[in-house]
Amino acid sequence: MTVKKKIYITVSWALVIACMGVIFWMSSRTASASSEMSDSLIDRILALLGIEFSSFIIRKTAHLLEFTGLAMLTFNAYYSTFRRAAAPVSFIITVLYAVSDEVHQIFVDGRACQLRDVLIDSGGALLGIIASLIILKIIKCAVERRNKNITN
């Protein structure tokens, strides 16, 4: 394995850990602090766009998207390291982290462990794995085309 590949793998796993750290930090905030932070941001964005939307829907969409990102990072790191079974293993890792995130919230003032959030996070994980597989397919096709053009 080349040094460049080792660095890529190390950075890929570091990004997974960093994403997990951000999720953990956000889940460590009390319910009132979390609501205040997200509602303030949501209000600014909606005012900028000139639209009205439910804060609840936006917060749950954010849940979905943060776990979509975690699944994509995990897929990339796992695929780069092992190549085999990246989709199911990455999905399982992400869902297990979603479960641990909800369990962690039991210990945070005003927060709760909710099955609904695990299901939303799992949906995000599935979306991230599907997106990763599509991106991988596009990359493989591009590499094949490039290699075909070089040999011709």
Image (cartoon, rainbow, N blue to C red):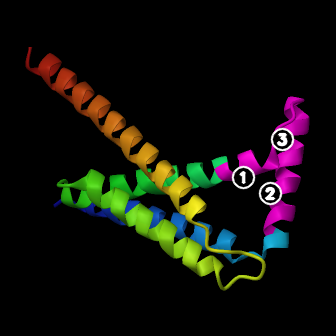
Res. 36 image quadrant: bottom right
Q: Nearer the viewer, mark 1 or mark 2?
A: 1
Residue 71 lies in the magenta stretch: no
Q: Nearer the viewer, residue 138 or 30?
A: 30
The crowding category of the residue bearing disc 3, from other C-alpha atoms within 10 Å (few below 14, some 14 to 19, many at least 20), is: few
The residue that mark 1 highlights is 59
The image shows residue 129, relative to residue 32, as above or below, that is above
Q: Quadrant of the N terminus?
A: bottom left
Left-right relation of 79 to 16: left
**CA neighbours of label 1 inside 10 A, class few (<14), some (14 to 19), many (20+):** some
Q: Are marks 1 and 2 in contact (CB under 8 Å)?
A: yes
Q: Amino acid at mark 2?
A: Ser
Please report the residue visible at 48 percent of the width from the left and 49 percent of the height from the top.
Answer: 123
Task: Locate residue 24 relative to residue 137 in the image: left or right.
Answer: right
- Which badge, 1 or 2, comes first in the chain's sequence? 2
Dot 3 amino acid type: Ile
The residue to which callout 3 is attached is 45
Q: Position of residue 71 (x, y in %)?
A: 43, 54
Q: Is residue 44 above or below residue 151?
A: below
* Residue designated by label 2: 38
- Secondary structure beneath disc 1? helix
Q: Which residue is drawn at the image coordinates 59% and 60% (left, top)?
A: 117
Query: Which residue is depicted at the point 64% across and 77% down?
Result: 105
